[in-house]
């Protein structure tokens, strides 16, 4: 399993002032390629990888509807399907990203793909990859889902934005190959629905994955230096932790 980090920006300032790139993560297993959370720049940054959407992209997954995770979803759908000519591309997304006044995926775009609605306990097979929903939580009023990706003999957990709550630990598996955290802040901010370093430490101590990775950085995290923060997490938990950077490629 191979991961391509198209961007590592998190929060309004770093994302929308382009202090770092954004655009989410590409996940490759066998002949299957998924795009996770295609925020601003996802389409353009896609071409820094060896792949082309209309030839290689099999699915798109939105953990939630906020623009730093979804801004390029319609563009990617149009490209990956060749405006509807290429069939079988899958889109997995929460219901509120697809319906009603909060929707971010246009009805026109939805007609071009096979749509699956994320919900707790749901699972989907997309080529060589299995996508399973671990739990739902809220993030500034929208549905958010933590996800497990299975491919070959590897398991990767993706924990997107949200304020950590103890019930998460009931749903997160132990001992997976990699846990990815959208750890936006260094210190806890009780009134803001984002993960912080103490949350990451608590989860890693309880669930003991083989490796961990932090991404989706705020200005505060960049000032702290994500490389130093990752080293601090490693020392506190004993779990080898890496800080993602724009354009990073990681083999799991």
Image: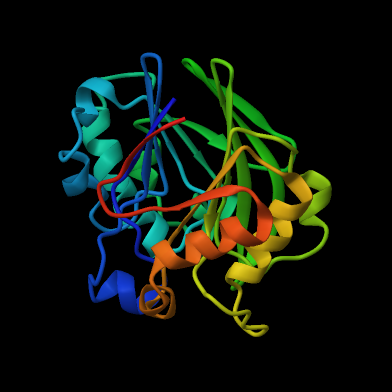
Name the quadrant containing residue 14: bottom left
Residue at x 38% of width, y 71% of height? 225
Q: Nearer the viewer, residue 37 or 78?
A: 37
Depicted 152 relative to depicted 16: above or below: above
Q: Nearer the viewer, residue 21 or 209?
A: 209
Residue at x 67% of width, y 83% of height? 190
| Left or right, residue 75 beside residue 169 | left
Depicted 79 relative to depicted 165: above or below: above
Q: Position of residue 166 (x, y in %)?
A: 82, 62
Name the quadrant containing residue 22: bottom left
Name the quadrant containing residue 195: bottom right
Q: Position of residue 123 (x, y in %)?
A: 65, 29
Q: Where's the N terminus, which quadrant? A: top left
Please say whether residue 146 is visible from this viewpoint: yes
| Left or right, residue 205 beside residue 158 | right
The colour scheme used here is rainbow
Looking at the image, how many numbered discs can be counted on the residues? 0
Depicted 210 relative to depicted 96: above or below: above
Please say whether residue 82 is visible from this viewpoint: no
| Left or right, residue 124 beside residue 26 | right
Q: Position of residue 121 (x, y in %)?
A: 74, 36
Q: Position of residue 31 (x, y in %)?
A: 36, 14
Q: Nearer the viewer, residue 134 or 112?
A: 134
| Left or right, residue 204 beside residue 154 | right
């Amino acid at each position: 399993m191979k991961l391509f980090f198209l961007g590592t920006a998190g929060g309004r300032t770093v994302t929308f002032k382009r202090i770092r790139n954004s655009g989410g993560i590409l996940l490759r297993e066998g002949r299957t390629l998924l795009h996770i959370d295609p925020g601003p720049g996802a389409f353009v940054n896609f071409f820094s990888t060896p792949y082309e959407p209309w030839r290689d992209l099999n699915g798109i997954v939105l953990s939630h509807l906020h623009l730093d995770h979804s801004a390029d979803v319609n563009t990617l759908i149009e490209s990956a399907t060749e405006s509807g000519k290429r069939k079988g591309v899958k889109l997995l997304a929460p219901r509120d990203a697809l319906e009603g006044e909060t929707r971010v995926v246009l009805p026109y775009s939805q007609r071009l793909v096979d749509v699956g609605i994320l919900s707790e306990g749901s699972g989907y097979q997309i080529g060589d990859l299995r996508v399973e929903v671990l739990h739902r939580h809220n993030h500034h009023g929208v549905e958010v889902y933590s996800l497990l990706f299975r491919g070959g003999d590897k398991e990767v957990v993706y924990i997107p934005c949200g304020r950590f709550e103890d019930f998460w630990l009931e749903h997160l598996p132990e001992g997976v190959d990699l846990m990815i955290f959208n750890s936006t802040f260094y210190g806890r901010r009780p009134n803001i629905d984002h993960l912080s370093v103490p949350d990451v430490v608590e989860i890693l101590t309880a669930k003991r994955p083989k490796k961990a990775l932090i991404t989706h950085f705020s200005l505060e995290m960049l000032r702290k230096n994500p490389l130093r923060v990752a080293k601090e997490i490693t020392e506190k938990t004993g779990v080898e932790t890496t800080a993602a950077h724009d354009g990073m490629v990681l083999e799991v």
